[in-house]
Amino acid sequence: MTARGGRRAADGEARWEGQWYVVPWQVIFRDLDAFGHVNNAVYFTYFEWARTRMWLELTGGTSATDVSFIVVRAECDFRHQIALEPIEVRVRIGEMRNTSYETSYEIRTADGRQVSATGRVVVVLFDWKKQAKVPISDELRRKVRLFQKEAE
């Protein structure tokens, strides 16, 4: 807990906030480059961590073998530098197609005021044993709407 009674980002307790799944994170030294700010490639790792945590919560999974999608496209817009500080990585699911869906991201300062980056990643649901894409089930669509508090 912080002195103000809120949770520190390092506590790692993810939560649903509106239509966003919010994952607190403490930037660590290895994420920084020689200039003292988070290296651009690391932002995609932050996206990955938030996306995976959200997926496991949505599906009830508990391990890496429960992640049944592959990334087919990833993009990031950098707005402000991030230093050795607590941040929040926000993710939500957007358009869902037959076998793929989009995830949108915001990386914010821990107080939520400043957006440091935005991004978009497209994933395809994938059966690792068959090495083939699979359709998105009605059950998954329902869970996404419920978790993101969308109207049915």
Image: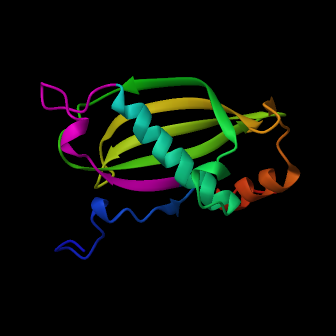
The answer, for residue 54, to whether it is visible in the render is yes
Q: Could you tell me which residue is drawn at 41 percent across and 24 percent down?
A: 77
Q: Nearer the viewer, residue 64 or 138?
A: 64
Q: Nearer the viewer, residue 136 or 29?
A: 29
Q: Position of residue 110 (x, y in %)?
A: 29, 53
Question: What residue do we see at 60% from left, 38% from top?
Answer: 103
Q: Residue furthest left?
A: 35
Percent position of residue 27, x then y: 25, 46
Residue 103 appears left or right of 15? right
Q: Which residues are magenta?
A: 21-40
Instruction: Say which residue appears at 35% left-offset and 32% top-offset.
Output: 42
Q: Is residue 79 left or right of residue 68?
A: left
Above or below — where is 140 with respect to 125? Answer: below
| Quarter occupied by residue 46 | top left
The question of residue 106 being in magenta is answered with no
Q: Compared with residue 81, is residue 67 higher up or lower down, i.e. above or below?
A: below
What's the colour scheme?
Answer: rainbow
Front residue (pair 135, 61): 61
User: Is any atom of residue 149 visible in this view?
Assistant: no
Question: As drawn, which residue projects farthest toward the front?
Answer: 129
Question: What x and y, as percent, mark residue 125?
Answer: 74, 38
> Which corner quadrant holds the C terminus?
bottom right
Q: Is residue 24 magenta?
A: yes
Q: Is residue 12 above or below residue 116?
A: below
- Image quadrant holding the N terminus, namely bottom left
Residue 119 placed where, x, y %? 48, 31
